[in-house]
Amino acid sequence: QKEVEQDPGPLSVPEGAIVSLNCTYSNSAFQYFMWYRQYSRKGPELLMYTYSSGNKEDGRFTAQVDKSSKYISLFIRDSQPSDSATYLCAFGGSGTYKYIFGTGTRLKVLA
Amino acid sequence: DGGITQSPKYLFRKEGQNVTLSCEQNLNHDAMYWYRQDPGQGLRLIYYSQIVNDFQKGDIAEGYSVSREKKESFPLTVTSAQKNPTAFYLCASSPWQEDNYGYTFGSGTRLTVV
């Protein structure tokens, strides 16, 4: 079983749709949960960072962590063409400074 | 503006050549990292450094070397021993603390073997 699983997509949605991006993980030691957005030929940029189970909201973005199910999600409301990018989930654990990244989900928002 | 600068943006390597990728940060971060990104494989850690003059191998260090002579700089050399070097290389930095609120990444270098 892979440590992190992320559907690679591509995921195509119409402008204004609600998008749900998901990752599952197997390592119970993960305590830090992140979502990065990566535009084509650019470096990833941090979108959301959470430490505990529950929801965290920032504008149109909501990150959800369910530690009991080892499942994290990123919701994008009122999606825009500018949201078209690859979204990477990432995980960090206590006692380690190395993050484990998902393979990324490619999202395309159609105008 | 604080950030990480990677150069060059594109790099072409002939068979048997060593090439060096530059990474400079002005964020005053202690830790720096090199990742390799290939389609469908996500980011894989090559090397990381916590402090000046110290660095550790990551998951795929074979065929690569690094140095950390200054806090701001963490260059990566792709040696001729790296058999499949064509990839997108990303440098990142963070404070050296457990809850470091995520990495800051550079804009990447795309290396192609010709």
Image (cartoon, coloured by chain):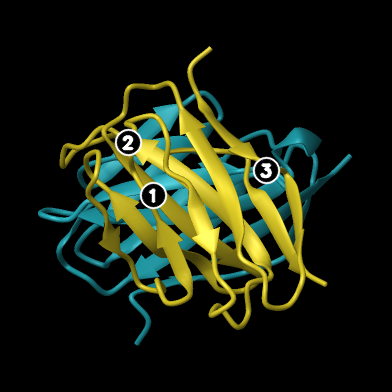
The count of marks equals 3
Between the residue at mark 2 and the residue at mark 1, the CA separation in whole angstroms equals 9 Å
Instruction: Residue at 67%, 70% (x, y): give it.
Output: B17
Where's the N terminus of chain A, which quadrant?
bottom left
Q: Residues within 10 Å of mark 3 (few under 14, many from 20)?
A: some
Q: Chain of mark 2?
A: B
Chain coloured cyan in this rendering:
A
Secondary structure under the numbered disc 2 in the rendered image: strand
Q: Position of residue A73 (x, y in %)?
A: 44, 53
Chain coloured yellow in this rendering:
B
- Evaluate if marks 2 and 1 touch, with contact meaning CB atoms under 8 Å apart: yes
Q: Residues within 10 Å of mark 1 (few under 14, many from 20)?
A: many
Q: Which residue is mark 2?
A: B94
The mark found on residue B33 in the picture is 1
Is residue A50 shown left or right of residue B10? left
Q: Position of residue B74 (x, y in %)?
A: 42, 43
User: Which amino acid type is marked by label 2?
Assistant: Ser
Q: Position of residue B30 (x, y in %)?
A: 26, 33
Ranked by sequence position, the earlier of labels 2 and 1 is 1
Could you say which quadrant of the image residue A100 lies in?
Answer: bottom left
Instruction: Residue at 33%, 39% (x, y): give it.
Output: B69
Q: Residues within 10 Å of mark 2 (few under 14, many from 20)?
A: many
Secondary structure under the numbered disc 1 in the rendered image: strand
Q: Which residue is mark 3?
A: A42
